[in-house]
Image (spheres, rainbow, N blue to C red):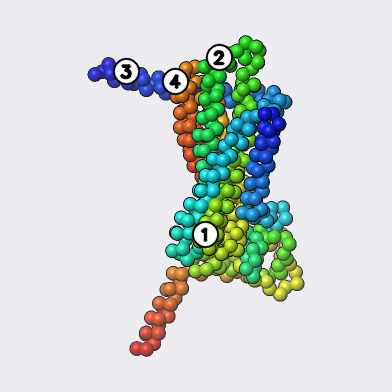
Amino acid sequence: MGRTTDLWVGLFVCAGIGALLILALKVGNTSGFSSADALQVSANFDNIGGLKPRAPVKSSGVVVGRVTAIAFDDQKFMAKVTMSLDKRYKFPKDTTASILTSGLLGEQYVGLVAGGDAANLAQGEVIKLTQSAVVLENLISQFLFSKAAEGDAKK
Amino acid sequence: MSERAVFSVRKLGRTTSDMVMRLGYSARFIMLTLLHSGTSFRRFGLIIRELYYTGVQSLIIILVSGLFVGMVLGFQGYHTLQTYGSESALGVLVALSLVRELGPVVAGLLFASRAGSAITAEIGLMKATEQLSAMEMMAVDPIARVVAPRFWAGFISMPLLAAMFSAMGVFGGYLVGVVLIGVDEGSFWSQMQSAVDFREDILNGVIKSVVFGFAVTWIALFQGYDAPPTAEGVSGATTRTVVTSSLAILGLDFLLTSLMFRGV
């Protein structure tokens, strides 16, 4: 009894740890970099739309970081989005940050488009060139106003 | 009329104070178990023996139900997702619902009814046949010899069982989604991997299962230890173990979920 019990329990523990490993490697992604090797930068937006903390930061479609915090700056009256970028990637100082939507109804993310500056973004720096989220209501009202203006011109 | 009212109020008070007293007794019991677990770690063979009974013998039911839960998730998820034309998100749906919720909770419920009831019945019967008193007579502490090894065995085996349940469920979802229905295999796995985070999802699921393991073994041990030493008492205690630990699992799950996934 003793030895077979040991054998079975050993197999059981191995199977359990194996299942955890399968979950970690096959099902999940462990690549989420820790804050130790991340570059903290922030950007001010007029309107962030539906952006949420932990939303991805992408450049050319590749995830290069995550949004860590969103706050309201009552000096500039703008939204302040803090994000941590993977240290492996360097972005020039004149990088443009814009809030984009994946697909028509998908989640919102921050898209980075690199500029041509020789110097790179450093820890804690602010991205100056930003483009706000597209708010559908504003688009529609612009469209309606322009239509109305056209109608006036025809009269 | 007034006599009956007084009687019912008295009964209510008595039930409440009994409940509070039992809660205090069970807290004292688990503290005692934790304090006396040093001996059972020195005699690790005892824990291994109990691991065999609680863990290995629950394997079949955990693996089979994990497989079937995953397969059902595969069917239902596909059915719902295809109306939105996003069948490729099936992997995400199956993996997230298993790893976050269904794995720990269903494995915990099965563990409570398979291993928890067995623990209660065993200890209750030991008490009814005065084996525990006999141990005390021989200066063997029944808490260190009988209770603590079972506690640690349950505590260790529950997260392992939950992980196996989740892994088996993902495999079941894969069988139904990819092999049977024909969802694209690449997008099934890649979307799953990009959506499931190790720390955020998998570790939180493991934490849940650890908490459930603690709660279930605690309840099972206490109900057995506290059971009236009669056949009826033991059977009642076994029933109470399953009911109480199921409720505890569901309540704790709500609490932990609201702490972990606050929707940000």
Whether pointer 3 and pointer 1 mark residues with C-beta atoms closer than 8 Å, the reply is no
Query: Residue A31 at x, y = what percent?
Result: 68, 56
Instruction: Give the distance between the C-alpha atoms of the residues marked 2 and 1, in whole angstroms.
Output: 56 Å
Q: Amino acid at mark 2?
A: Glu
Question: Where is mark 2, residue-wise?
Answer: B130
To which quarter of the image does residue B34 belong?
top right
Q: Is residue B217 visible?
A: yes
Q: Amino acid at mark 3?
A: Phe
Instruction: Give the distance between the C-alpha atoms of the residues marked 4 and 3, in whole angstroms.
Output: 27 Å
Query: Residue B102 at x, y = what percent?
Result: 52, 46
* Mark 1 element type: helix
How many C-alpha atoms fall within 10 Å of the one at disc 2: few (<14), some, or many (≥20)?
Answer: few
Mark nearer the N terminus (1 vs 4): 1
Query: Residue A105 at x, y = what percent?
Result: 49, 66
Q: Name which residue lies at 40% across and 85% down.
A: A150
Is residue A82 rendered to the left or right of residue B69?
right
Instruction: Give the distance between the C-alpha atoms of the residues marked 2 and 3, in whole angstroms.
Output: 36 Å
Q: Name which residue lies at 60% across and 59% down.
A: B189
Q: Nearer the viewer, mark 1 or mark 4?
A: 1
Mark nearer the N terminus (3 vs 1): 3
Q: Is residue B256 visible?
A: no
Q: Residue furthest left?
A: B1
Mark nearer the N terminus (2 vs 1): 2
Instruction: Give the distance between the C-alpha atoms of the residues marked 4 and 2, in whole angstroms.
Output: 16 Å
Q: Which quadrant holds the C terminus of chain A? A: bottom left
| Chain under callout 3 | B
Q: Name which residue lies at 50% across and 34% down.
A: B113
Whether pointer 4 and pointer 3 mark residues with C-beta atoms closer than 8 Å, the reply is no
Q: Which quadrant holds the N terminus of chain A? A: top right
> Which label is found at residue B232?
4
Mark nearer the N terminus (2 vs 3): 3
Question: Where is mark 3, residue-wise?
Answer: B7
